[in-house]
Image (tube, rainbow, N blue to C red):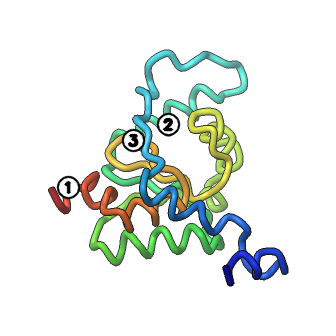
């Protein structure tokens, strides 16, 4: 296909088929109760994990992002277009942002931003969020459709 040829030429992502696969089965996983069984560590990581758990519990939609990240901007724009309020945590602006990103990676196995949570469930990054919106799963999670 044209996109595969472009990928080989280094002009497009090589994983173009991944989005379609994800659209059929969004990468939505039940996020475990973050406050239950959080290991105590002397480096303060348990405090950050508790802070993340509290933030995710307090807001229906949470987007951990970076202010200059294009993928984060696309995710926030998607929620804006759906008329959905979200709580954004800009990791590059937060004093503990780097440590928080490390804690998020431990909790979600995802190091990249955006890192999206919907109603307490970890959705994933921009690709998973866009795919869930395309399939209608995101709208169901948000209670916008039945």
Residue carrying label 3:
121
Q: Classify residue 85 by image quadrant.
A: bottom left
* Element assignment for label 2: helix
As drawn, 53 above or below 72 = above
Q: Residues within 10 Å of mark 1 (few under 14, many from 20)?
A: few
Residue located 60% across and 65% down the image: 17
Give the numbered dot on residue 51. Answer: 2
Of mark 3 and mark 1, the one earlier in the sequence is 3
N-terminal of the two: label 3 or label 2?
Answer: 2
| Up-down relation of residue 16 to residue 103 (above or below) | below
Which corner quadrant holds the N terminus? bottom right
Alpha carbons under labels 3 and 1: distance apart: 14 Å
Using the rendered view, name the quadrant where residue 56 is placed: top left
Residue at position x 63%, y 38% from top?
109
| Rendering coords of residue 87 (x, y %) | 40, 58
- Say the numbered circle drawn on residue 143: 1
Disc 2 vs disc 1: Cβ atoms closer than 8 Å? no
Q: In the structure shown, which secondary structural element does the residue marked by tag 3 occupy?
A: strand
Q: What kind of element bears circle 1?
A: loop
Separation of marks 2 and 1 at Cα, in angstroms:
26 Å
């Amino acid at each position: 296909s044209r996109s595969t040829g472009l990928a080989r030429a280094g002009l497009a992502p090589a994983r173009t088929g991944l989005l379609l696969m994800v659209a059929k089965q969004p990468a939505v996983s039940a996020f475990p109760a973050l406050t239950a069984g959080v290991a105590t560590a002397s480096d303060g990581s348990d405090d950050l994990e508790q802070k993340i758990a509290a933030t995710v519990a307090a807001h229906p939609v949470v987007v951990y992002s970076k202010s200059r990240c294009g993928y984060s901007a696309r995710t926030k724009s998607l929620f804006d277009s759906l008329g959905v309020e979200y709580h954004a945590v800009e990791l590059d602006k937060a004093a503990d942002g780097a440590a928080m990103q490390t804690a998020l990676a431990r909790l979600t196995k995802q190091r990249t931003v955006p890192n999206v949570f919907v109603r307490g469930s970890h959705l994933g990054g921009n690709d998973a969020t866009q795919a869930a919106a395309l399939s209608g799963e995101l709208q169901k999670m948000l209670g916008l459709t039945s």
